[in-house]
C-alpha cells in the first residue's frame, strides 16, 4: 500500500512543477511583450515629436527633393548612355499627362489687363503666333506663281506684287475688331458727375484743376472755404 502511494505523490509533484514552469514561461512571454510594446510606443512618440517639430510643408519639400535627386540620376544615366534626356523623358509621358500639362501651361499665362505697351505688344505677338496654322496648299500655289522669285535674291523685284487672299483679309478684320472690343473693356474713362462743382472752363482746365486738387487740396482747403463764404481777408 505504501509503495503505491509513493509514485502517486511523485507524479503529483511533477505535475505541479510542470504547471509552475508553464506559468513562469507565460509570465516571461508577457513580460517580453510588454517591454517590446513599451519600446515601440517610445519610438512612435519620438517619431511623432520629430514630425511635429518639422515645418508644415516638410512632406512636400521632401517629395520635391526626392524628385530632383531622381531627375539628376536620370540625367546622368542618359548622359552616360549618350541619349537626349528630354527625348527620353517625353517618351515616358502618357497622353493623359501631356494633356494635363498643356492645360496647366495655358492657365499660367492669364491676361492681367494692360500693364505697359511693351507687355501688350509681346502678348499680342504670342497670341498671333499661336493662331498661325501652316497652309501647305497656299504655299505651293504661291511657289508656282512666284517661280524663282519665291526665294528672292538681291536682284529680285517682288515688292508690291503680293495680293492677300480674301480669307486672310477677313481674318485680319476679325482680329482688329477683337482688339477694338478688348480695348473698350479696359477703358479707364471716368463717369461724369452732374452734382460736382463746376470750377473749370474747358476739359483741359478741368484736368489741371483735378491735378492741383490732388497735390495741393489739403493745403488750400481753408482758403477755398473762406472764398466761398466771402470771409477771406
Image (spheres, rainbow, N blue to C red):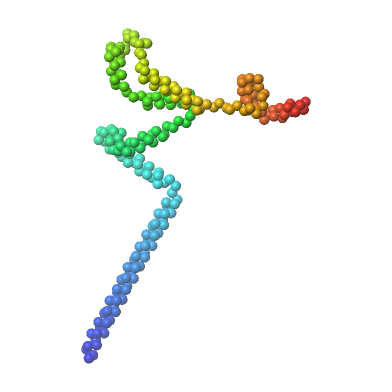
Relative to 139, say whether 102 is above or below: below
At 26% across and 33% down in the image, what residue appears?
Answer: 83
Q: Position of residue 84 (x, y in %)?
A: 28, 33
Q: Position of residue 73 (x, y in %)?
A: 31, 39
| Image side of residue 117 versus residue 6, left or right | right
- Asked whether 206 or 26 is in front, the reply is 206
At 39% across and 20% down in the image, what residue appears?
Answer: 170
Relative to 19, say whether 171 is above or below: above
* Quadrant assignment, res 93: top left
Relative to 163, say whether 15 is above or below: below
- Asked whether 136 or 181 is in front, the reply is 181
| Image side of residue 196 versus residue 15, left or right | right
- Asked whether 166 or 212 is in front, the reply is 166
* Quadrant assignment, res 66: top left
Quadrant, the N terminus = bottom left
At 24% across and 88% down in the image, what residue appears?
Answer: 5
Q: Where is residue 60 in the image (x, y as percent from the top left)?
A: 40, 44
Tag count in the figure? 0
Residue 60 shows in this picture: yes
Quadrant, the C terminus = top right
- Asked whether 133 or 223 is in front, the reply is 133
Residue 122 shows in this picture: no
* Quadrant assignment, res 196: top right
Q: Position of residue 99 (x, y in %)?
A: 34, 36
Amino acid at each position: 500500500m505504501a509503495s503505491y502511494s509513493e509514485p502517486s505523490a511523485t507524479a503529483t509533484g511533477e505535475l505541479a512543477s510542470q504547471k509552475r514552469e508553464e506559468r513562469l514561461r507565460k509570465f516571461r512571454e508577457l513580460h517580453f511583450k510588454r517591454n517590446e510594446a513599451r519600446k515601440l510606443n517610445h519610438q512612435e512618440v519620438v517619431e511623432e515629436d520629430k514630425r511635429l517639430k518639422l515645418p508644415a510643408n516638410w512632406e512636400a519639400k521632401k517629395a520635391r527633393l526626392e524628385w530632383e535627386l531622381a531627375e539628376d540620376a536620370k540625367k546622368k544615366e542618359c548622359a552616360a548612355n549618350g541619349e537626349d534626356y528630354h527625348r527620353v523623358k517625353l517618351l515616358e509621358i502618357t497622353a493623359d499627362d501631356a494633356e494635363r500639362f498643356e492645360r496647366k501651361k495655358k492657365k499660367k499665362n492669364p491676361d492681367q489687363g494692360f500693364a505697359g505697351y511693351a507687355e501688350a505688344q509681346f502678348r499680342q505677338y504670342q497670341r498671333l503666333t499661336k493662331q498661325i496654322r501652316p497652309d501647305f496648299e497656299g504655299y505651293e500655289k504661291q511657289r508656282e506663281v512666284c517661280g524663282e522669285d519665291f526665294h528672292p535674291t538681291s536682284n529680285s523685284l517682288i515688292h508690291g506684287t503680293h495680293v492677300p487672299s480674301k480669307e486672310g483679309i477677313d481674318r485680319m478684320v476679325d482680329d482688329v475688331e477683337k482688339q477694338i472690343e478688348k480695348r473698350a473693356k479696359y477703358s479707364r474713362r471716368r463717369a461724369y458727375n452732374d452734382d460736382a462743382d463746376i470750377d473749370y472752363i474747358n476739359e483741359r482746365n478741368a484736368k489741371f484743376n483735378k491735378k492741383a486738387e490732388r497735390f495741393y487740396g489739403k493745403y488750400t482747403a481753408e482758403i477755398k472755404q473762406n472764398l466761398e463764404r466771402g470771409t477771406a481777408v
